[in-house]
Amino acid sequence: MQISTRRRWWTIAAVASLIIAAFLGVMIGPAGRVSSANWDIVWNVRMPRVALAGIVGAMLSLAGASYQGVFRNPLVDPYLLGVAAGAGLGATIIFAVGREATKGWPIDPLPVVSFVGGLVAVMITYLVGAAFGASKSSVTLVLAGVAVVSLFTAIQTFVLQRNNDVIREVYSWILGRVSNATWGDVRLVLPYVIVCSAVLLLHRRHLDLFRVGDDEAASLGSDVARVRIVVVIAATMGTAAVVSVSGLIGFVGVIVPHAVRLMAGASYRRVLPLSLIVGATFLILVDIPGRVLQKPAETPIGVVTAFFGAPFFILLLRSRKTMA
Amino acid sequence: MSSLQLDAVSVTYDGRVALAPFTCHVGSGEWLCLIGPNGAGKSSILRSIAGLVAHDGVIAVDGAPLAIRSARRRATLVAYVPQSPVLPDDMTAFEYVLLGRSPYVSYFGHESRHDRAMVDNVLQRLDLVTFADRHLGTLSGGERQRLVIARALAQEAPVLLLDEPTSALDIGHQQQALELVDRLRREHGLTVVSAMHDLTLAGLYADRLALLHEGHLVATGDAAHVLRPETLSEFYGASVTVHQQDDGTVVVIPRRTPQ
């Protein structure tokens, strides 16, 4: 009874902080407080920006927690597995082809090509990791991810050099940005995020089962291979969709689920929904200093998250080492 | 109450025969213990029954082949306790035992009130109630082993498979764990198949022993029949004295030949 009450409080606290974060996100900016004079800015600049930051943060955190569950590895996130780099390569190719050329297409190819790139990357990471003993050490999978990230980044650089004219556009995209978000961006990613999040949340009980390992999960009646594929595809598709509009924002997917675990326990039944809410809150808040730090210029959100995320990740590595 | 039949069950890993065709009938409520040196095929038998390795031959519970069952249905018939179970440090004891209810939950569903009550009940019967909210990382070896058995019990499967259930325990906890299995077997009519290294304990608790060597069944029967010095010397390469006590208990004692 006590435990379930405590869980409820965490959920209420998480939702409340999301509302406060969204409120602050709409209030704060170079153009000053909300008034009838700057309503246009609020509606067309700040609100889509807050909405997009929330959606991106929610999706990256939820995807991170899900990858951690299926790979039984608390160190992985969409960025470290190479999903973001793969999606980035896909997006770069679309930029190289030219956004003007794809404008008239019935379905925007940006999220789709990003998804394919992300899926290829995560598959390579997983297969390489599995071949070299990722089941024995969680660091192996991360190292495999590092190799895949380097490879995809190299190919991306090559594509960019051949297409000098889009370097600026792609570069600002790589750094991660929600600054020039439009309601169009929100509309583009929202369907993917809703579907993928729903699929992931529906599998949260299975991820708890994965915590005892493939063999025992199978002996408890789980179709391990199928669940793993479904979760990886949903997490990758959601990540690719948000990465295709927001650029590469690292560490969110590892920081947020970890913080959630510290607060509310390690069961994925709580970690997944809370990561969604806390992830949204986190990215909305992190986006605020970026607007005012170098005012009127923008500090890309990817820079801000990496600034906080990298030291946190090192601490996490250190605590893993002491545990082992 | 369910019986278990294995008919010409064999396992091959990468062309290497781990288990030659093995046929055996384990009666309802019987405890069969598989013994034999490392690599004899004990784990292959248990893993085949649990559906974790590809195998030839037919394994049936109450005459119905397991191969035609879904993984979930199979898990309601056979509960498997591996040699070194994974116990996540940050999982609570209640959450862990609740995993045993998974075979009864639909794909997108969640455990019902009945499933949770069932877990409470199992924790109560195994004297684990005080641990319910504790994290597994904070428990002792004996407590962890009891929890693993509790999870298997929550599975409500009539066939219980134990792979080296006592290898990580001291002698007191070994006895406690095996007494617990025996008590549950009597209370619930469980059919038990275990693999064990300690021959004296194996003979003490099991109804029947099956000695395996390099994938072949070489001897089967009660302790007095299987645990003979010449047999153990031949297949284990062990030098032992076997002593039979007045109550029929067979004790295997390692021996050193004077240099």
Image (cartoon, grey):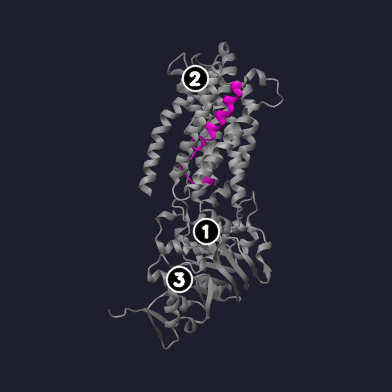
Q: Are marks 1 and 3 in contact (CB under 8 Å)?
A: no
Please report, as a chain letter, where disc 2 is located.
A
Which segment did they paint magenta? Answer: A69-96
Q: Which residue is mark 1?
A: B97
Q: Secondary structure at mark 3?
A: loop
- Separation of marks 1 and 2 at Cα, in angstroms: 49 Å
Q: Looking at the rendered structure, which numbered label has been put on residue B37?
A: 3
The percent position of residue B43, horizontal first and vertical second, equals 51, 66
Please report the residue visible at 64 percent of the width from the left and 51 percent of the height from the top.
B107
Q: Residue furthest top?
A: A37
Q: In this rendering, which labeled residue sits more in front, label 1 or label 2? A: 1
Q: Residue furthest bottom?
A: B246
Q: In this rendering, which labeled residue sits more in front, label 1 or label 3? A: 3
Q: Which residue is mark 2?
A: A28
Question: Do pointers 2 and 3 mark residues of a single chain?
Answer: no
Question: Do pointers 1 and 3 mark residues of a single chain?
Answer: yes
| Residue A26 makes an appearance in the image | no
Q: Secondary structure at mark 1?
A: helix
The percent position of residue A218, horizontal first and vertical second, equals 58, 56
Q: In this rendering, which labeled residue sits more in front, label 2 or label 3? A: 3
Q: Is residue A303 left or right of residue A201?
A: left
Please report, as a chain letter, where disc 3 is located.
B
